Image (cartoon, rainbow, N blue to C red):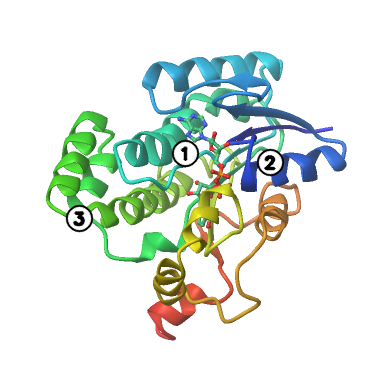
């Protein structure tokens, strides 16, 4: 059996993924605020470092795949600290344990929102690894009435980090694919509140049009992650794979 580390394993996409892996006989080390194999707060540098060390220890120093599902959608600093740094720093800290596995894989959960208008300064600060600056800029965006740009910013930065990391920082040379799965709207506790208000639902349906099969279930996303995290994925790396019912193709049009 392979050993898979899943962040955000307690809910939504992460929980569906943990079930799918376990059903196949893999060993899952779940990381979440509470209730996982490892309880940790990925919004802090210390929490990430401790969680990665604990995961590597629990895995006996060999991790076959890391999938990062932990994320938040409430505008605030946590969008930077959890969605971006809680992913990138956690994955980076696990690199030695991944390198110790024969066919390691990394999959990050992004979002089609990453293609939408974002704050370039926040994205740049993230990619520079400057969390303090990114947090300051996020605070400014909120104060300046641009809070809606933060989630796209965190996911755009994540996609760029994955593309850079996959090929330019030795991960490909080490045989480790790094990819992003970017959903549209998934029916999970995170999105549940959005549909309570019919006006909000209308706004969401316009922002994330999903002509193919509508909203997805966590399992629809998890199945694609399973492939990218498996041995069967030998040559896909640095890609953002939209699993979004056609949202990205609709929003960006045929030329992209
Ligand atoms: P969810 O809210 O059901 O699950 C997220 C999990 O992350 C929770 O178990 C939560 O406890 C954990 N988490 C949050 N902050 C944490 C922290 N500081 N430390 C450790 N764990 C933390 O959300 P869902 O829908 O399963 O989302 C998973 C990922 O998919 C997120 O990155 C989200 O941005 C992304 N996504 C979700 C979409 C949706 O419509 N639900 C659409 C596109 C992307």
The mark nearer the N terminus, 1 or 2, is 2
Callout 3: helix, strand or loop?
A: loop
Whether residue 233 can be seen here: no
Q: Residue lying furthest bottom in this view? A: 254
Mark 1 neighbour density, 10 Å: few (under 14) some (14–19) many (20 or more):
few
Task: Give the x, y percent position of residue 205.
Answer: 47, 74
The residue that mark 1 highlights is 170
CB of mark 1 within 8 Å of CB of mark 3?
no
- The image quadrant that residue 210 belongs to is bottom right
Give whichever of 172, 74 is nearer the camera. 74
**Residue at screen point 64% across, 42% down:** 14
Q: Is mark 2 within 8 Å of ligand 1?
A: yes
Q: Is residue 130 left or right of residue 102?
A: left
Q: Which mark is residue 15?
A: 2
Residue contact between numbered discs 2 and 3, judged by CB atoms under 8 Å: no
Screen quadrant of the N terminus: top right
Spatial CA span between label 2 and label 3: 31 Å
What is the spatial separation of the Cα atoms under label 1 and label 3, in whole angstroms? 36 Å
* Image quadrant assignment for residue 23: top right
Disc 3 residue: CB within 8 Å of ligand 1: no
Q: Residue furthest front?
A: 197
Using residue 155 as the reference point, say whether residue 181 is left or right of it: right
The percent position of residue 62, horizontal first and vertical second, equals 69, 23
Label 2, secondary structure: give it: helix
Mark nearest the camera among 1 and 2 is 2
Near mark 2 (Cα within 10 A), the count class, few <14, some 14-19 or many ≥20, is: many
């Amino acid at each position: 059996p392979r050993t898979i580390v899943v962040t955000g394993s307690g809910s939504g996409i992460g929980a569906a993924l943990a079930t799918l892996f376990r059903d196949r006989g893999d060993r899952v080390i779940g990381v979440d605020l509470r209730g996982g194999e490892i309880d940790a707060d990925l919004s802090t540098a210390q929490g990430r470092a401790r969680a990665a060390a604990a995961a590597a220890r629990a895995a006996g120093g060999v991790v076959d795949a890391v999938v990062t599902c932990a994320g938040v959608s409430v505008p605030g600093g946590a969008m930077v600290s959890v969605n971006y740094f809680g992913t990138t720093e956690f994955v980076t800290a696990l690199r030695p344990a991944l390198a110790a596995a024969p066919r390691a894989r990394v999959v990050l959960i992004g979002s089609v929102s990453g293609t939408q208008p974002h704050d370039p300064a926040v994205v740049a600060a993230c990619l520079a690894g400057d969390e303090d600056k990114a947090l300051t800029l996020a605070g400014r965006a909120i104060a300046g009435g641009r809070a809606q740009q933060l989630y796209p910013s965190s996911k755009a930065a994540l996609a760029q980090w994955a593309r850079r990391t996959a090929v330019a920082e030795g991960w490909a040379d080490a045989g480790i694919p790094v990819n992003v799965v970017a959903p549209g709207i998934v029916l999970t506790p995170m999105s549940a509140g959005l549909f309570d208000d019919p006006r909000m639902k209308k706004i969401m349906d316009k922002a994330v049009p999903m002509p193919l099969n509508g909203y997805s279930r966590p399992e629809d996303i998890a199945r694609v992650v399973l492939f990218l995290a498996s041995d069967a994925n030998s040559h896909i790396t640095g890609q953002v794979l939209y699993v979004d019912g056609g949202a990205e193709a609709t929003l960006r049009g045929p030329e992209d």
